[in-house]
Image (cartoon, rainbow, N blue to C red):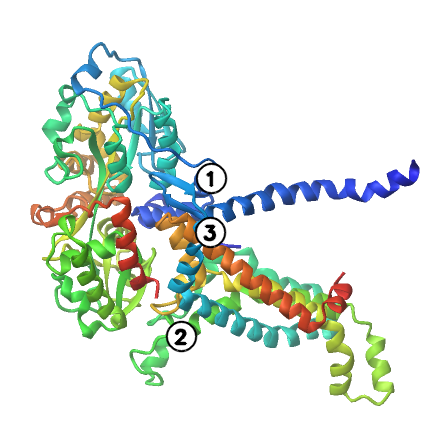
Amino acid sequence: MRSLRARLTPYWLALPGGLWLVVFFVVPMFFMASLSLQTGDPVNGFSQTFHWSTYSDTINLYEKQFVRSVIYATIVTLLLLVISYPMAYWIAFRGGRYKSTVLFLVLLPFFVSFVIRTLSWQFILADNGFILQPLKNAHLLPQDFHVLATSFAVICGLAYNFLPFMVLPLYVSLERIDHRLVEAAHDLYAGRFEAFRRVVWPLSLPGVFAGVLITFVPVASDYVNASILGGTHTTMIGNVIQTLYLTNNDYPAAAALSFTLMGSLLIGIFAYARALGTQDVMQTAA
Amino acid sequence: MSSDDFGPIPSDALLRGLTQRRLTRRDILRAAGVGGGALAASSFLAACGVSGGKAEKSQGTTFWTGKKQAGSAVFANWPLYMDVKGKSDHPSLDRFTKQTGINVKYKEVVQEMPSFYGKIQPVLSAGQSTGYDIIVMTNGVYLDKLLEANYLVPLDQSKMPNFNKYAGPAIKNPSYDPGNKYTMAWQSGITGIGWNPKYVKEPIHSYQDLFNPKYKGKIGMFADNADLPNLALQGIGVDCEKSTPPDWQKAADKLKAQRPLVRQYYEQNYIGPLSKGDIWISMAWSGDIFIANSGNPDLDLQFVVPDEGGLIWTDNVCIPIHVAHPVDAMTLMDYYYDPKPAAMLTEYINYITPVPACKEVILQDAANATKKSDKDYLQGLAKSPLVFPTSDMVSKVHNYRVLNADEEKQWNAIFEPIYQG
């Protein structure tokens, strides 16, 4: 009797979380999946017709924006990794008693709304703003030079907005590394680079995995940066879904695109996890 | 993580500026977290499906026989669409209650047309009351559907003395409701061209000015499927209200050719870039220009209804069928055509009023104002052609093309690729 109870306890404990997941994730997903196969319009109503071609139609129509989003997300993620790794490394190993202060500084911009932060970049980078105007006056830049409304601006905006998502997981995994291991590597005649390559980097991989995951996915579906900092050729898939949903009320197409996006991201993530050696990563991460 | 809040909002005037048009208002509301309505509506639609179904046409004359004033009314309106004093007190409604003894329950429940339609349509088709005596609908596909399905009560033409006396020519007898049989205008706005005279030195008067290579990279257009296409149709010399699919294609081709010149297709927030000089000339909404200028003394943005024609949109008050207090609703709707309450609204909202005569009241208020800033503001308001458009402006504006569901699909397929680059 006791053993049965003991065996059931974990399930009971998982129940609230599980229910939460079912009600707020599984059920809505089911509705969205069903919606993506319906046809109709919001005035006359939608009905289930298992209209699979919505998927192929929307992909054909918005392939460009789709590919662009993936490219942007890849560039942003790599950029973030290159910027954040030294930063997290420094905080974890050299931060000393300023660790928490520095971490707080990394997080500080998050106390301001996402949209406002992005809008302030629009202000900073304005064609006649306080950065570009003096450079133009000094004839260092041509008069019609602009940063806004370019892919560069969108990518920078995305990188800026998602930086802490990369720094924090990297920091957590680096922080946990026992420094004596590095010392041991040095004792075994490993140089600084060799010690990093053979000890620190492999041990920080779970952080890299987590960081890449939680930046790539939201960056790929972001729509705020493209609409505020972008121009006529920077539309991302998030913007398309937003328009389909809220302006055109073409709910099936929006749902179908969302599922396509989710599906391809999941495939990408699994491939990536496989490449990195899932077991290893998941275990160390757990 | 997404646009979960819009940060510090300095004043109602700015917020109204940002929310000037449906699309932007919609964005703001989503940003403020109340746009869940759309989500709710769609999952509701997904789960249940929504049946169509028309109601019997109610006869205008017989509907009103025996109907009496009940002493209360429920008014469903958009947010920030009624004068406010303090937090929740609406002086013009208080005045109404004092005059007529009718208590008004004022509800800001209309956040966007599709979700609001999704909310009331199933109720009406089931033959039940929405609980609202007055609803506010923007002209366009959803109002057309309400009319088509006979979901609106024909107005009692004998109870519209103020309307008959004071309604302006721009909103009287609109093409979507000839003879004002079912609707009366609440507020309107004009879509035209705005420019910043700091950078654009010659006067702008034509739609073609948006295609001037001189302004390459400094031109703003709208990323929407109402204003962008309809204005383009006017621009190629077609009456947008009567346009045909070949016209649409021609307008789309013209817009496509313009793409390399365009800085950005704006979903909202074009007014900031226009003020700062990131763009010099842009499609614009009249009210935005007025509010931007009145909030910044250094700014002198200009607005024009292009020679080829501009667009007017109108939010309309109307009475849904199965209404509980129709006489009270009628009285309230007509009350706002009295220049005094109309002026109270305009002084707060800054949109185009359906009652041009309220200008005198605003000037009177300006004369009586004790604070200089109030006086200047009210005088500027009364003088502005953006709030009281000239007859020349009014003669050039058109309504949006009315689209049925099939046409809308075709329309979107033609125009969407332009701004979804």
Question: Does dot 3 land on a helix, a strand or a loop?
Answer: helix
Q: Which residue is mark 3?
A: A255
Q: Residue at x 25, y 16 (%)?
A: B100
Question: Which mark is drawn over residue B40?
Answer: 1
Quadrant of the rendered image containing residue B322: top left
Q: Residue at x 26, y 61 (%)?
A: B221
Question: Chain for mark 1?
Answer: B
Distance of mark 3 from mark 2, alpha carbons?
Answer: 41 Å
Is residue A102 shown to the viewer in this render? Answer: no
- Same chain, marks 1 and 2? no
Residue A93, image x, y percentages: 74, 74
Q: Which residue is mark 2?
A: A131
- Out of B287 and A203, give the one closest to the viewer: A203
Q: Amino acid at mark 2?
A: Ile
Question: Chain for mark 3?
Answer: A
Q: Residue at x 24, y 12 (%)?
A: B67
Left or right: where B196 falls relative to B111: left
From this viewpoint, which residue is outermost toward the right?
Answer: A2
Location of residue B169 with respect to A219 vertically, above or below: above
- Same chain, marks 3 and 1? no
Q: Residue at x 73, y 67 (%)?
A: A281
